[in-house]
Image: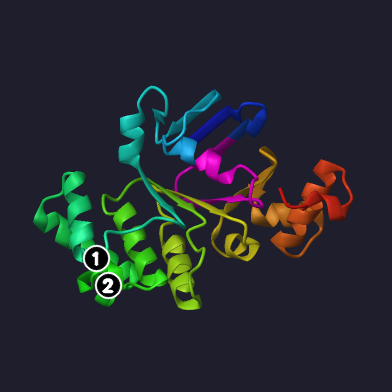
Amino acid sequence: MLDIESLSKTYGAHAALREVTLRAGEGQVFGLLGPNGAGKTTLLRIVATLLAPTAGTVRVAGHDVRRDPEAVRRSVGVVNGGMGLPARLTGREVLRSFAGLYGLNRRQADARIGELDTALGLGRTLDTRAGDYSTGMAQKVVIARAVIHDPPVLILDEAASGLDIFARRALLDFVAATRRPGRLTLYSTHVMSEAEEVCDRVAILHQGEVVTVGPVGEILGSTGERTLERAFFALVRAQAQEPRAEVFRAP
């Protein structure tokens, strides 16, 4: 479902990604973990065809991001922490509009909205104007909008950022439910406990490089740590060969 080979992205002298190679198959939630500035968002924007790679190849659901970007866009749904909604439209109007862009008729759109209402607990957000939403209500509709066409690959980039405890729980439960044949969810976060709960495999990124990739249990076992957060610290310190106080200085 995702095949990334020797991917690099540079901005002048700054390398946001350095020779990243990753593969993720269907039926799993794959986590991208790292602090702010690690390269997670850059990588996901390339996967979603929002950025062009400097070097390397990326294939999403069998489609190359350079050669067939339109097919990639049809194959993905994207959510990040900063997406907005038209304030004057209700959730139902937003979802019907996007369903139409993906070729669904009204009957198909309403059936899909019903499925997402059940999965996400949309409730009154469907018939409330977006301008009156709380952060959690808005994020639920943003997620529903991203998956209205039932894409094989779902990209969640810091999607839980700013959510209250109830909205965050609904999001994590929804992510867990995406784990099924023919589907892949990419879950980017710097909150290790989220990844530990919902991810089958994770890639840890630091300063644009992949530190390690594997199932959560294997990463814990290889480091001898009991939590993913502690394992992350150990792996990044070992890679950087810097004193602890220096590894996480602000960019």
Residue 115 or 50: which is nearer the viewer? 50
> In this view of the protein, can residue 96 be seen by the observer?
yes
Judged from the image, the secondary structure of the residue bearing numbered disc 1 is helix
Residue 22 or 10: which is nearer the viewer? 10
Residue drawn at 45 percent across, 68 percent down: 173
Residue 26 or 207: which is nearer the viewer? 207
Q: Residues within 10 Å of mark 2 (few under 14, many from 20)?
A: many
> In this view of the protein, can residue 24 be seen by the observer?
no
Residue 222 disc label: none
Residue drawn at 30 percent across, 73 percent down: 132
Where's residue 1, x and y in %? 44, 39
For residue 241, which quarter of the picture?
top right
Asked if residue 166 lies in the magenta stretch, the reply is no
Where's residue 137, x and y in %? 36, 71
Stretch of the chain drawn in magenta: 22-44
Q: Is residue 100 above or below residue 56?
A: below
Q: Residues within 10 Å of mark 1 (few under 14, many from 20)?
A: many
Circles 2 and 1: CB atoms closer than 8 Å: yes
Which residue is label 1 attached to? 91
Q: Of the residues shown, which amino acid type is indicated by label 2?
A: Thr
Q: Is residue 42 above or below residue 31?
A: above
User: In the image, 13: left or right of 111?
Assistant: right
Residue 125 disc label: 2
Where's residue 119, x and y in %? 33, 67
For residue 233, which quarter of the picture?
bottom right
Q: Of the residues shown, which amino acid type is indicated by label 1?
A: Gly
For residue 89, which quarter of the picture?
bottom left
